[in-house]
Amino acid sequence: EIVLTQSPDTLSLSPGERATLSCRASQSVTSSYLAWYQHKPGQAPRLLISGASSRATGIPDRFSGSGSGTDFTLTISRLEPEDFAVYYCQQYGSSPGTFGQGTKLEIK
Amino acid sequence: QVQIVQSGAEVKKPGASVKVSCKASGYPFISYAIHWVRQAPGQRLEWMGWIYAGNGNTEYSQKFQGRVTFTKDASASTAYMELSSLRSEDTAIYYCARGYTARITSTTVGYYFDYWGQGTLVTVSS
């Protein structure tokens, strides 16, 4: 199965700054079938991005996804206070789908 | 709007079974699959399988085959996950999520999850 490695494990930034989160796959992800989720404690995870770069319904345009093959990036252009959370990537181009270990985005 | 609400936390003894419910609203329940994903402490999210809410077809991850059963009650727009022969390693938060299918090849598909429940903590302890 494909192993996803996210970096960094923790990212400390201030509101208004730009966040860049990385997700690297152990082998190429078919058709860029990669999704990103936001997860806050005690809440339901929220789909942000599918197909590596397509924003889900209702997701603000400060969130963007890019990449292909084995390297993918989630960028948050200007952090808002509500953006501090854990972010997971997931590949669904091969079975079974697998998740990264998560990046915690915390307030500096 | 789409909402998925799961049942409350459970504490079980080793060897017992647990049944978690997942009630969906805001969309035609029978038109989508419900997937189950769990996260044990300090571990990654792990896909367990799915049930198609229309016809009840299921697919189980090999890891859980024989120990997990998915069912649904379409009249109540509710899906259920029952895990048996519980052991301490099954302590985890269990999530249900609506699945979106992506075609990989002519015979295989992949899934991502567009709406999730809030999670149900299952603790297995003697």
Image: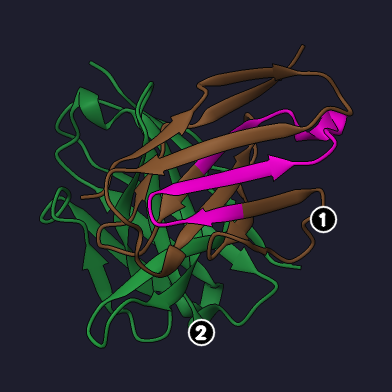
Label 1 marks a residue whose chain is A
Label 2 marks a residue whose chain is B
> Distance of mark 1 from mark 2, alpha carbons?
29 Å
Kind of residue indicated by mark 1: Asp
Query: Few, some or many C-alpha atoms within 10 Å of disc 2 (few <14, some 14-19, many ≥20)?
Result: few
Which residue, given by chain and number where applicable, does mark 1 sit on?
A: A61
Q: Secondary structure at mark 1?
A: loop
Query: Few, some or many C-alpha atoms within 10 Å of disc 1 (few <14, some 14-19, many ≥20)?
Result: few
Task: Point out the stretch of residues depicted in magenta.
Answer: A66-88
> In the rendered image of this protein, which colour is used for chain B?
green
Looking at the picture, do discs 1 and 2 lie on one chain?
no
Q: Is residue A58 left or right of residue B61?
A: right
> In the rendered image of this protein, which colour is used for chain A?
brown
Q: Is residue A22 left or right of residue A2?
A: right
Q: Is residue A74 left or right of residue A3?
A: right
Q: Judge whether A93 appears above or below B126 on screen.
A: below
Q: Is residue A29 magenta?
A: no
Instruction: Give the residue at x 49% y 28%.
Output: A7
Viewer-side residue, B83 vs A98: A98
Q: Which mark is residue B31?
A: 2
In which quadrant of the rendered image does the C terminus of chain B lie?
Answer: top left
Examine the image and state in which quarter residue A85 appears: top right
